[in-house]
Amino acid sequence: MLRAPAIPSWAFAAATLLVALAGCGRSSPPVVAPPPPEVVVTRPVVAEVTDTIELTGNATAVETVDLKPRVGGFVTAVHFADGQDVSVGDKLVDIDDRSYRIARDQAEAEIEREQAELAELESERVRNEALLPRGAVTQEQVGIITAKRDMAAATLKKDKAMLAQAELDLDFCRVTAPIAGRIGARTVNVGDLVGSGAAPTTLATIVSVDPVYITFFTDERSLLVARERAIRDRREDRGGEGKPEANAAEGEPTWRNIRDLAIPVDVALVTDEGFPRRGVLAFVDIAVRASTGTIRCRAILDNPDRLIAPGMFCRVRLPFGDPAEALLVPDRAIGIEQGRRTVAVVGADDRVTIREITPGKLDGSMRVVTKGLSAGDRVIVSGLQRVRDGAVVRPVEAQQAQPARE
């Protein structure tokens, strides 16, 4: 067998040296820095903002009626569906009226009998008075006839009242809606026996739906401040500023007519953003709860979409104080870092600075900033996750947001 010739060791060393020299002659690729991240910035909005206090409350119906029959009997028909809207006078429930028709017919017959008897006694009285000068009858007899006539007239009057009552009872067999609104679930069905009197049967409940009341509790100071502010605005509108004697002569609104001041009350449901609904303060209770220092108030609010139902939880915002100029930024631009509220501000050199601020009240989608910003700052509102303190960015100006108008 033939063997391959052995390769000398110096040949391996030469090959290794050549490979190393070839590697040293190749240049490394240049390092390209990534472009600065693009962020959206906006400047704070300067606007007048009124201090407010936020409270919780519940919706209540302006009118609530428990539908109860005024006569007893068996239910013969139910004319409404649970939860439907009703108008004044709509027919709702029918009660068996046969016994009440009989009572009415009996009362009519009794009246006819009494009328005939009264006519006979009146005729007899006239005839006896004509005979009195001739001595055919005595004055006593005429007096007796006259008394019987008067008794018959009184009995007729009583029977007419009984007929009116019988007709009322017959009408009460048709239960109608006393108010307009929404009716709840029925509590009786056809064939049920319902009662009246001391313990009447509840047939259903009707509540008015537009407008509605919003009941809430507030502290006495906030209420007094809101009232004084509204009175002052009213004076200024009438040109009475500086003329207290003129305003005293006109008479300031009292708690009884607090609605005249039109103190705005903003309302939000649990699914609302901000406070899109507005009513006015319409009632203040007669006393403050000494244990809590709060007083019950009630606002009236239009409910055209009928979305607010009695008992619903609501957030309430009551304005107080005078409007003051403030800086506002979009609420989404504010972050939290180790318990501090911060915003990312882009400087003139497009470098980011994380700045601590003191936030104030929320006004729609905008947040008041009481400390830490100036009107000329550029605040990042989009792209916050791509920046850090000291980083260089490429800012893009956004359309300046506006606060919600009062």
Image (cartoon, grey):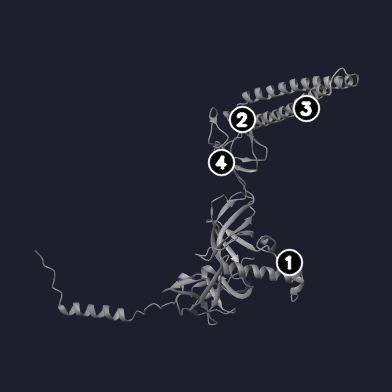
Does 93 appear above or below 401? above
Three-letter amino acid code at the position of disc 2: Asp
- Looking at the rendered structure, the secondary structure element under dot 1 is loop
**Image position, residue 329 (x, y; %):** 56, 72
Q: Are marks 4 and 1 in contact (CB under 8 Å)?
A: no
Which residue is pictured at 53% across the width and 66% down the height?
293
Identify the residue position indicated by label 4 in the image. 184
Identify the residue position indicated by label 3 in the image. 150
Identify the residue position indicated by label 2 in the image. 94
Q: CA distance from mark 4 to mark 2?
A: 17 Å
Residue 403 position by quadrant: bottom right
- Badge 4: few (under 14), some or many (20 or more) residues near its Cα, within 10 Å? some
For the residues carrying marks 1 and 2, which lies nearer the camera in this image? Answer: 1
Q: Are marks 4 and 3 in contact (CB under 8 Å)?
A: no
**Nearest the eye: 75 or 332:** 75
Three-letter amino acid code at the position of disc 1: Gly
Identify the residue position indicated by label 1 in the image. 251
